[in-house]
C-alpha cells in the first residue's frame, strides 16, 4: 500500500482551507498520498480532489470506524486534525492503529482545561485559581475568596463560546441558569489581570524549531465590544516576554509534545509574573496562520506536515518588521447591502493580506464567539504602536451597511 496521511478537515469552516491545501501540498512533496476525512453530507469536491471519506466528525466512535476502513486501504503514517474539536478523536485513532503523534493522554492535556492547568501546576507554572461549579454557592464562595471578576468557561471549549465574565453576585445569579444544566462541562477561574500573549510553535523530536510570540491588543472575553487583534513581537523583547517563551518551552515538553504545532496563551502581569492561560495542539485560530505566513513565509500547518514526514526538515523563517492581524467586525445587524471587499483592503498601504467572508445579501447577527467575525486583514509596521495606528486606518476604511430583515 502507498504511504498516506489523513487530514481531518471541516470545509464549512472556510478559514481552514489554506491550512488544508498547505498540508496536502507538503504531503505530495514527499510522495505521500493525502486522504481527507470530511463531514457527512459534504461534497467530496470540497476537498479539492483529495480522496475523501465521510464521517460524523462530532461522533468519535464513528470517526474511528471510518479510520479503520482508511487504514485497511492505506498505509497511514500520520493524522492531522486542523480543528480544535478533532484533536482528541485523532489521538484515539492514532492509538487504535499505532500511528505516531499525540496519544489520548497527551491530547487531553491540550484539550481539557482541568487537566492542562493541573499538569502546568505540576511543572511549576503559575495558573489562575479555579473551582468546580458544583453549586451556585460554591461559585459564590470562590468569588468571595478571589474577588470579582470571575470567568465561567467550558472545560473543553474554544473561541470563547459559552464563556462568561461575571463581575458581581447579581450578575452571577443571572448567568447561573445559562450553565446550570451543563455545570459538569464547566470550570470557574479567577479573571487574570494582565497583558495576554500567545506563542505559536513548531516542535520536532521534542525541540522547538520555530516560535512566534505575539501580543493580543484586546481582551478576548470582550470580543463583542472590541476588535480582535494580535501583533508579533520579534524585536527588543522585554524580560517578561522572554520569560513567556521559556515557560512555553517547559510546558510543551511537560505536556508530551514530540513533533507538532501548538498555540499557547499566557498573561503577563504588571508585577512581571507569567500566568498560563490555555494550550492547544493545533495551529492558532482566526488569522494567526496567515499573519505568520505573511510575516515569516511559513504556513504552520504545512510545516507541521513536513516535520512529521521528514525529521531532518527545519522551517526557514524570513526576517522583517512586526506584523499584526485584526478581525473585521461590525456592530450592524440585518441583511448586508454594502461591504468593503478583501481586494479593496489589499490595495491599502501596509496591508499584506486580507479575507472577507461576508458578502452583500448575507445576514448579520450579533456574535456568539470570538471568531464570529466578518473577516480579517494582516499588515506590517515598524513596531507595536505603528501597527496599532495602521489597524485604525484600515478599520476605518472597512465599511458595512445593512438593511433590516423583512419580517
Image: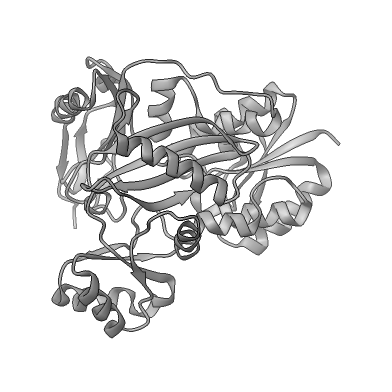
Q: Of residues 185 and 217, which is closer to you in this image?
A: 217
In this picture, is 119 found above or below 271?
A: below
Q: Which part of the image, by quadrant, shows the N terminus?
A: top right
x 26%, y 15%: residue: 347
Instruction: Please determine whether, in this image, residue 284 is positioned above or below residue 366.
Output: above
Instruction: Residue 31: name its quadrant.
Output: top right
**Residue 288, can we see it?**
yes
- Where residue 115 appears, as percent x and y from the top left, is 50, 63
Image spot of residue 388 (x, y percent): 19, 29
Q: Nearer the viewer, residue 75 or 70?
A: 75
Answer left or right for 351 relative to 253: left
Above/below status of 7 relative to 69: above
Please state the horizontal and vertical placement of residue 312, each as a whole percent of the image: 68, 24
Please state the total of marks drawn on the protein image.
0
Q: Residue 274 versus residue 219: which sits nearer the camera?
A: 274
In which quadrant will I find the C terminus?
Answer: bottom left
Residue at image position (24%, 18%) is 382
Q: Quadrant of residue 396?
A: top left
Along the horizontal axis of the image, is 390 left or right of 114? Answer: left
Residue at 22% of width from left, 14% of height from top? 349
How is the rendered protein coloured? Answer: one colour
Question: Can the viewer see residue 55 in this picture?
Answer: no
Residue 110, position in %: x, y? Answer: 51, 54
Relative to 24, 192 lies left or right: left
Relative to residue 399, is residue 263 drawn left or right? right
Given the current orientation, which residue lies at the most extreme right position? 1
Amino acid at each position: 500500500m502507498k504511504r498516506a496521511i489523513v487530514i481531518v478537515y471541516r470545509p464549512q469552516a472556510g478559514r481552514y482551507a489554506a491550512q488544508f491545501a498547505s498540508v496536502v501540498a507538503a504531503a505530495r512533496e514527499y510522495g505521500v498520498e493525502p486522504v481527507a476525512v470530511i463531514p457527512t453530507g459534504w461534497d467530496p469536491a470540497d476537498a479539492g480532489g483529495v480522496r475523501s471519506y465521510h464521517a460524523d466528525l462530532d461522533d468519535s466512535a464513528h470517526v474511528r470506524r471510518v479510520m479503520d476502513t482508511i487504514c485497511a486501504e492505506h498505509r497511514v503514517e500520520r493524522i492531522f486534525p486542523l480543528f480544535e474539536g478533532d484533536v482528541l478523536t485523532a489521538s484515539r485513532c492514532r492509538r487504535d492503529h499505532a500511528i505516531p503523534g499525540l496519544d489520548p493522554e497527551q491530547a487531553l492535556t491540550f484539550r481539557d482545561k482541568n487537566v492542562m492547568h493541573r499538569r502546568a501546576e505540576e511543572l511549576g507554572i503559575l495558573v489562575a485559581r479555579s473551582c468546580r461549579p458544583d453549586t451556585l454557592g460554591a461559585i459564590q464562595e470562590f468569588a468571595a475568596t478571589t474577588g470579582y471578576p470571575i470567568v465561567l468557561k467550558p472545560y473543553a471549549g474554544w473561541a470563547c463560546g459559552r464563556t462568561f465574565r461575571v463581575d458581581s453576585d447579581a450578575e452571577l445569579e443571572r448567568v447561573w441558569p445559562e450553565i446550570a444544566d451543563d455545570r459538569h462541562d464547566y470550570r470557574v477561574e479567577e479573571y487574570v489581570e494582565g497583558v495576554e500573549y500567545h506563542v505559536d510553535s513548531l516542535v520536532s523530536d521534542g525541540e522547538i524549531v520555530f516560535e512566534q510570540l505575539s501580543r493580543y491588543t484586546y481582551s478576548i472575553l470582550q470580543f463583542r465590544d472590541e476588535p480582535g487583534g494580535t501583533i508579533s513581537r520579534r524585536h527588543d523583547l522585554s524580560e517578561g516576554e522572554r520569560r513567556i517563551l521559556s515557560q512555553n518551552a517547559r510546558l510543551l515538553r511537560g505536556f508530551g509534545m514530540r513533533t507538532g504545532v501548538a498555540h499557547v496563551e499566557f498573561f503577563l502581569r504588571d508585577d512581571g509574573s507569567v500566568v498560563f492561560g490555555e494550550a492547544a495542539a493545533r495551529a492558532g485560530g482566526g488569522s494567526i496562520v496567515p499573519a505568520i505566513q505573511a510575516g515569516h513565509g511559513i504556513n504552520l500547518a504545512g510545516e507541521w506536515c513536513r516535520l512529521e514526514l521528514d525529521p531532518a526538515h527545519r522551517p526557514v523563517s524570513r526576517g522583517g518588521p512586526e506584523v499584526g492581524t485584526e478581525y473585521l467586525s461590525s456592530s450592524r445587524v440585518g441583511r448586508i447591502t454594502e461591504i468593503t471587499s478583501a481586494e479593496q483592503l489589499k490595495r491599502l498601504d501596509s496591508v499584506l493580506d486580507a479575507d472577507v467572508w461576508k458578502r452583500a445579501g448575507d445576514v448579520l447577527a450579533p456574535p456568539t464567539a470570538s471568531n464570529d467575525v466578518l473577516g480579517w486583514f494582516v499588515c506590517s509596521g515598524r513596531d507595536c504602536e505603528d501597527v496599532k495606528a495602521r489597524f485604525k486606518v484600515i478599520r476605518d476604511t472597512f465599511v458595512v451597511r445593512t438593511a433590516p430583515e423583512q419580517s
